[in-house]
């Protein structure tokens, strides 16, 4: 897989406020980005898991930790698809 590096500067206080090392924060930021972009419908579960550096099962667990549904359908859409509306 081809990759590109990005870098950004964060205030030093962020690390102590979150009680994270730079590597831990990087990992968490990638997971949060994958979860949020999946929730918004920007990327598939597969791509979000890849971005987060997780297998699909671990990504589903991350969705659960952040209270994000693994399904990209609303209750109304499910009912309509099932023929109840």
Image (cartoon, rainbow, N blue to C red):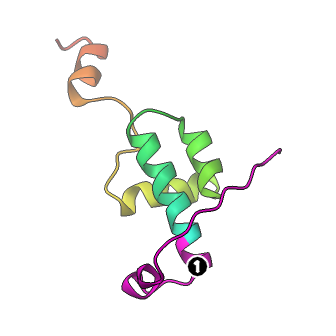
Say which quadrant the C terminus sits in: top left
Please state the horizontal and vertical placement of residue 18, each as a whole percent of the image. 40, 81
- The residue at the point 42 percent across, 79 percent down is 14
- The residue at the point 53 percent across, 55 percent down is 59
Residue pushed farthest left? Answer: 85
Residue 6 placement, left or right of 69? right
Please state the horizontal and vertical placement of residue 70, each as a whole percent of the image. 41, 43
Report the front residue among 9 and 34. Answer: 9
Instruction: Residue 33: say if magenta.
Output: no
Say which quadrant the N terminus sits in: top right
Per the image, label 1 sits on a secondary structure element best described as helix
Q: Eyeballing the image, is 69 above or below 18?
A: above
What is the total number of numbered labels drawn onto the structure image?
1
Q: Eyeballing the image, is 48 above or below 52?
A: above
**Residue at image mark 1:** 22
- The residue at the point 33 percent across, 29 percent down is 73
Residue 4 placement, left or right of 31? right
Q: Eyeballing the image, is 81 above or below 64?
A: above
- The residue at the point 53 percent across, 73 percent down is 25
Residue 83 placement, left or right of 7? left
Q: Quadrant of residue 23?
A: bottom right
Within 10 Å of disc 1 (Cα), the crowding (few <14, some 14-19, many 20+) is few
Please state the horizontal and vertical placement of residue 53, each as a whole percent of the image. 65, 58
Per the rendered image, the range of residues in magenta is 1-25
């Amino acid at each position: 897989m081809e990759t590109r590096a990005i870098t950004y500067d964060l205030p030093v206080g962020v690390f102590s406020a979150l009680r994270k090392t730079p590597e831990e924060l990087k990992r968490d930021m990638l997971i949060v980005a994958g979860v949020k972009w999946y929730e918004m419908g920007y990327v598939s579960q597969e791509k979000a898991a890849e971005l987060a550096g997780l297998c699909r099962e671990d990504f589903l667990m991350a969705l659960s930790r952040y209270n994000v549904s693994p399904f990209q359908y609303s209750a109304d859409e499910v009912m309509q698809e099932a023929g109840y509306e």
